[in-house]
Image (spheres, rainbow, N blue to C red):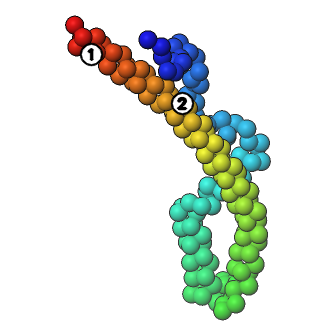
Amino acid sequence: MEYKYKLPSLEELKASRKPIHNDRIRHLQTLSASEKFAVFIHKQVGSIGFFFLILLWTIAWLGWNMFAPSETRFDPGPAFVIWLFVSNILQLILLPVIMVGQNIEGRAAEWRAQMDFEVNKKAEQEIEVVIAHLENQNELLLELIHRIDRK
C-alpha cells in the first residue's frame, strides 16, 4: 500500500523544532542603555506609585502655600506660578521619555506578535503532520479490516 503523504520521521520533526526561549529577554538585550533608561522611566511614570507621589507633592505644595503662615509661603495662591512652572517643566521632560518608552514597548509587542505567528505556523505544520499520520493509520486499519473480513 502506498502512502498519500510523505510523512516526516520523528527525528526530522525534532530537528525542525526551535529551542524555547524568552523573546522579551532577547528584546531587552537588544536595547541600548538610553533605551533601557527610557523603558525604566516609562514604567515608573506609568505606575500608581508615581501617581500618588505627584498627588502628594501637589497636595503638600498647594496646602503649604494656602495654609502655612504668610511669611513662610513661597508660592502665593491663587496663581501658584512656581508650582505651575515646575509642573510644566516636569511634563516637558517626561513627555519625550514616555513617548520613547511607548515606541520601544510597541516594538516589543510587534516582536511578540511575530514570535506568536511563527509558533502558530509551526504548530499548524505539526498538526498537519499528526493529521496525516492519523489518516494513514485509518487507511491501514481499514485495509486490515478488509483483509480480516475476506478471510
Determine crowd level at label 1: few under 14, some 14-19, many 20+ residues with C-alpha closer than 10 A.
Answer: few
Tell me the tag on residue 125: 2
Q: Position of residue 86 (x, y in %)?
A: 73, 74
Quadrant location, the N terminus = top left
Residue at figure coordinates x 70%, y 79% from the top left: 83
Residue at figure coordinates x 54%, y 67% from the top left: 52
Q: Position of residue 81 (x, y in %)?
A: 74, 85
Q: Secondary structure at mark 1?
A: helix
Name the residue at the front extreme: 150
Question: Which is closer to the viewer, label 1 or label 2?
Answer: 1
The residue beneath circle 1 is 145
Is 99 drawn above or below residue 121 in the view shown? below
Q: Quadrant of residue 71?
A: bottom right
Residue at figure coordinates x 71%, y 80% from the top left: 84
Q: Position of residue 73 (x, y in %)?
A: 66, 84
**Residue 104 or residue 11, whichever sits in front:** 11
Q: Amino acid at mark 2?
A: Gln
Q: How far apart are the alpha carbons under marks 1 and 2?
A: 30 Å
Q: Quadrant of residue 88?
A: bottom right
Q: Amino acid at mark 1?
A: Ile
**Residue 30 or residue 75, whichever sits in front:** 30
Q: How many marks?
A: 2
Residue at figure coordinates x 54%, y 30% from the top left: 125
